Image (cartoon, coloured by chain):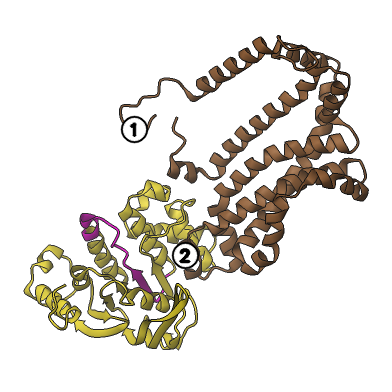
């Protein structure tokens, strides 16, 4: 099983503006469920709370109100049942690619030869077996993020949480990474909660897109594209693709206001 | 290799340093000879005095005497300063409780405290170690502390996301991320430890290189007085270079990322 839910989650924090303290509401009563083997994409404008929602699901931030459930059990803080892929990969610069993947496994209690084998297997999954001994600064942006994905997948979490993992990459690398993620998904069938502000990326990857505005989920849009989504070029040209993208866009601009 | 296009470096780095040394020593030799040998000295006279001290064995004895408390105090400062800096940087309670002593201790007028230290620890080895330790521990602690503060929050979050304990995060993430700062602190401490060693030898039981300085100064043998001074400066430079080599060994990613050391 791999299911993650936010139940009635709110997040408030205070910001000091000169002498006045202002209460900011980042999330207001957000509930969502990512079902087993499902890819759900959270999208919305900057500051809509999508990253905060993901970080609360991971346990890196606490909710002011509400609960986080993994497979129906309430969780507090981080756990090995969830794996996080960070926006800028956040590899440890003093470790090579293999050691970075091993780091996560060691934290889960792995040791010795089996640990190394598992780490190598996941580097192979993301196509980096040959570059196992490179340090992060010797890897391109896309390669770094692939190590980041391998590190999160290697601990075999129930759910993969991805915070705009391809946003910092150039357009071509980003498309390549999207294809690669779809392949990894086809092989591992991991439950994924994915944050992006890129609508094309949202439609391409998701089974369901949740549109957020001002700390609330405004709309849930099903993506009517079948899997496996191998031929990405063809999928991008489908009428369903454009229609779904437009529906998301409408949800982001409800009053028809120009972006 | 130079970073900017079209700006080729024609001299190696060491050649520039060497040329600078030749010019400086040459100028000292020329103008030093014009001065009464009581008020000053010059390189060739210092070299002669150096050979005398080597031949009669005084220099080797003094060096051994000086280096023991120096090495002991300096290593103790690293052993204490690094963990204290890590803990103070990482935990706010420790920072609030101890930060004030560390910041103030850095400015401690140690020379004024040496008589008191002698009352506590006597005139021998222990007081010298204490003086060296007290002079060098603060730059190491402060640099480590600042380094911990500069660790990117996201790297700590990587530890949290894999459910690493505080101790593991400190050892596996904070410590390596702080290493370049720690090495800088250890380098800064070299100079202070050398000064502390000489101070200790002046004010406690007169011994070692400090004794050579004092005794030759008292007999107006200025050239001999300069031998330990020049030797100590050269040793500090050498130790610094050695630490630089160690730094590139233990934290190679830093110079590779920064790439500032163009050569």
Residue A9 lies, with reference to residue B193, above or below; the image says below
Image quarter of the C terminus of chain A: bottom left
* Residue named by callout 1: B4
- Residue B56's disc number: none
Chain letter of disc 1 in the image: B
* Image side of residue B227 versus residue B234, left or right: right
Residue B223 screen position, x and y as percent: 78, 16
Chain letter of disc 2 in the image: B
Residue drawn at x 19%, y 82% is: A222
- Is label 1 in a helix, a strand or a loop? loop
Which chain is drawn using yellow?
A
- Is label 2 in a helix, a strand or a loop? helix
Q: Is residue A189 visible?
A: no
Residue drawn at x 84%, y 25% is: B212
* Image side of residue B122 versus residue B167, left or right: right
Which chain is drawn using brown?
B
Residue A254 appears in which quarter of the rendering?
bottom left
Residue drawn at x 85%, y 19% is: B57
Residue A47 lies, with reference to residue B199, above or below; the image says below
Total tally of numbered discs in the picture: 2
Residue A172 is inside the magenta segment: yes
Residue A84 screen position, x and y as percent: 40, 69
Could you give the CA–CA distance between mark 2 and mark 1, rounded to whole angstroms? 36 Å
Q: Which residues are magenta?
A: A156-175
Residue B176 screen position, x and y as percent: 55, 53
- Residue B158's disc number: 2
Residue A24 lies, with reference to residue A99, above or below; the image says below
């Amino acid at each position: 099983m791999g299911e993650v839910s936010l139940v009635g989650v709110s997040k408030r924090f205070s910001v000091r503006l000169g002498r006045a303290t202002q209460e900011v509401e980042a999330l207001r009563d957000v509930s969502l469920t990512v079902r087993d083997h499902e890819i759900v994409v959270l999208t919305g404008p900057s500051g809509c709370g999508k990253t905060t929602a993901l970080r609360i699901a991971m346990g890196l931030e606490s909710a002011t109100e509400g609960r986080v459930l993994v497979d129906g059990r309430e969780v507090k803080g981080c756990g090995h049942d969830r794996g996080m892929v960070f926006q800028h990969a956040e590899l440890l610069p003093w470790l090579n690619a293999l050691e970075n993947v091993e780091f996560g496994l060691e934290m889960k209690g792995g040791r010795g030869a089996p640990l190394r084998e598992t780490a190598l297997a996941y580097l192979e999954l993301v196509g980096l077996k040959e570059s196992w001994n490179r340090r992060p600064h010797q890897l391109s942006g896309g390669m770094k993020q692939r190590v980041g994905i391998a590190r999160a997948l290697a601990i075999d979490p129930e759910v993969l949480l991805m915070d705009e993992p391809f946003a910092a990459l150039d357009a071509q690398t980003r498309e390549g990474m999207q294809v690669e993620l779809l392949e990894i998904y086809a092989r591992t069938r991991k439950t994924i909660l994915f944050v992006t502000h890129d609508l094309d990326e949202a439609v391409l990857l998701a089974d369901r897109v949740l549109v957020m505005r001002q700390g609330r989920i405004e709309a849930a849009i099903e993506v009517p594209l079948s899997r496996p989504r191998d031929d990405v070029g063809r999928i991008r040209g489908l009428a369903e693709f454009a229609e779904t993208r437009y529906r998301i866009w409408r949800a982001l601009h409800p009053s028809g206001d120009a972006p | 290799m130079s970073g900017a296009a079209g700006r080729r470096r024609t001299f190696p780095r060491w050649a520039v340093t060497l040329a600078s040394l030749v010019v400086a020593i040459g100028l000292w030799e020329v103008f030093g000879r014009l001065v009464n040998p009581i008020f000053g000295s010059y390189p060739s006279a210092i070299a002669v005095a150096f050979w005398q001290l080597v031949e009669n064995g005084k220099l080797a004895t003094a060096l051994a005497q000086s280096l023991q408390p120096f090495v002991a105090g300096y290593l103790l400062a690293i052993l204490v300063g690094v963990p204290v800096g890590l803990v103070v940087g990482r935990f706010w309670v420790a920072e609030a409780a101890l930060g004030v002593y560390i910041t103030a201790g850095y400015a401690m007028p140690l020379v004024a405290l040496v008589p008191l230290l002698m009352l506590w620890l006597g005139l021998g080895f222990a007081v010298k170690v204490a003086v060296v330790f007290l002079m060098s521990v603060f730059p190491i602690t402060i640099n480590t502390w600042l380094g911990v503060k500069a660790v990117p929050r996201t790297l700590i979050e990587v530890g949290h996301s894999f459910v690493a304990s505080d101790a593991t995060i400190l050892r596996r993430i904070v410590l390596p991320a702080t290493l370049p700062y720690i090495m800088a602190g250890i380098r800064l401490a070299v100079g202070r430890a050398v000064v502390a060693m000489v101070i200790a030898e002046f004010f406690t039981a007169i011994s070692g290189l400090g004794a050579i300085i004092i005794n030759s100064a008292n007999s107006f043998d200025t050239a001999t007085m300069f031998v330990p001074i020049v030797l100590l400066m050269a040793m500090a430079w050498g130790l610094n270079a050695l630490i630089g080599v160690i730094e590139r060994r233990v934290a190679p990613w830093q110079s590779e990322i920064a790439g500032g050391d163009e050569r």
